[in-house]
Image (spheres, rainbow, N blue to C red):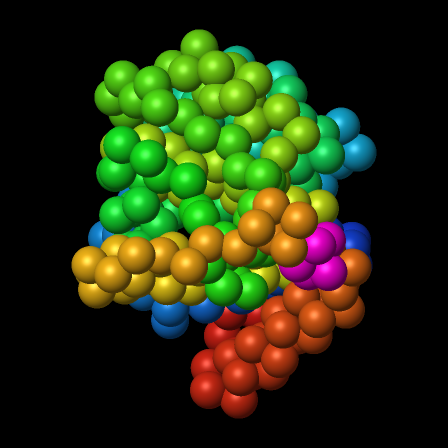
């Protein structure tokens, strides 16, 4: 039996995996709704096995706004024939997400995007998100930085390099590239990505004023970041509410 499958209905797989598919499909639709997508590029993935080596990911070159739960591919990082199949995933998806899931089992949901404001910051010589408000303070001292961009992430070696840089962090600013978010659930990954892009927008707009930034003290920034981390119910509620909006407007993502 192949390790690469596209399962077609809730009846064909267990309840837990189907819910994972529904949640990840919702995250794709919401990413398109928020204008985080970039053509048919970029990828979101979700581990379904305890070791993270079996994971769901979007099919090659399918627009986020059309993705359904049944469309998602189930890949196994141990299956070396994956890229030889006619329905192979995008090469950068396999090399980046596959190696991250193999190396970082705690990174259950991985979101890699090129959102406008996050990518603008990642293009600066100093891509740090300075704590100038509550949103930016959420990420204080909690970001990994990749300043060694060398082209497309289309080799296992590049995926392994990024996994080492990510380590135990949940956010990476990818210099000259975009952003990477790793979290325990789709709900948390979506919420982090949402606030990362809002924080990036706040900072970029503040830079554009040309006025001096009013940066928080380290103590206040750290206190604020810890307060964000203590409010876990909010990000769960945020994602649940966004799925209710999708259900009202177009529930096809859950098919």
Is 224 included in the stretch rendered in magenta? yes
Quarter containing the N terminus:
top right
x and y, in percent, of residue 55 in the image: 62, 37
Residue nearest the observer in this picture, 246 or 123: 123
Q: Residue at x 42, y 64 (%)?
A: 198
Relative to 132, does residue 77 appear above or below in the rendering? Answer: above
Q: Residue at x 53, y 21 (%)?
A: 165
Relative to 183, does residue 50 appear above or below in the rendering? Answer: above
- Residue 186 can be seen, yes or no: no
Residue nearest the observer in this picture, 2 or 102: 102
Q: State whether the magenta stretch is mostly helix, strand or loop.
A: helix
- Residue 35 can be seen, yes or no: yes
x and y, in percent, of residue 69 in the image: 55, 60
User: From which residue to which does the magenta span run?
Assistant: 223-228
Specify the quadrant of the image occupied by residue 24: bottom right
x and y, in percent, of residue 18 in the image: 69, 58
Quarter containing the C terminus:
bottom right
Q: Residue at x 36, y 39 (%)?
A: 127
x and y, in percent, of residue 229 in the image: 72, 55
């Amino acid at each position: 039996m192949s390790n690469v499958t596209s399962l077609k209905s809730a009846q064909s797989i267990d309840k837990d995996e189907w819910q994972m598919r529904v949640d990840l499909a919702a995250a794709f639709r919401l990413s398109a709704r928020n204008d985080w997508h970039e053509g048919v590029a970029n990828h979101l993935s979700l581990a379904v096995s305890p070791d993270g080596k079996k994971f769901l990911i979007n099919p090659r070159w399918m627009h986020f706004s059309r993705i359904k739960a049944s469309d998602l591919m189930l890949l196994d990082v141990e299956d070396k024939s994956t890229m030889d199949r006619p329905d192979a995933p995008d090469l950068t998806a396999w090399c980046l997400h596959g190696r991250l899931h193999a190396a970082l089992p705690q990174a259950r949901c991985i979101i890699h995007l090129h959102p406008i404001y996050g990518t603008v910051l990642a293009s600066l010589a100093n891509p740090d998100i300075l704590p100038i408000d509550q949103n930016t303070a959420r990420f204080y001292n909690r970001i990994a930085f990749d300043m060694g961009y060398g082209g497309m992430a289309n080799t296992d070696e590049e995926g392994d390099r990024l996994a080492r840089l990510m380590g135990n962090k949940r956010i990476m600013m990818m210099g000259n590239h975009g952003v990477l978010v790793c979290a325990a659930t789709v709900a948390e990954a979506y919420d982090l990505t949402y606030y990362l892009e809002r924080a990036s927008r706040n900072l970029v707009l503040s830079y554009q004023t040309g006025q001096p930034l009013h940066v928080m003290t380290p103590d206040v920034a750290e206190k604020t970041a810890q307060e964000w981390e203590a409010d876990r119910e909010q990000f769960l509620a945020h994602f649940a509410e966004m799925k209710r909006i999708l259900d009202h407007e177009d529930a096809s993502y859950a098919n």
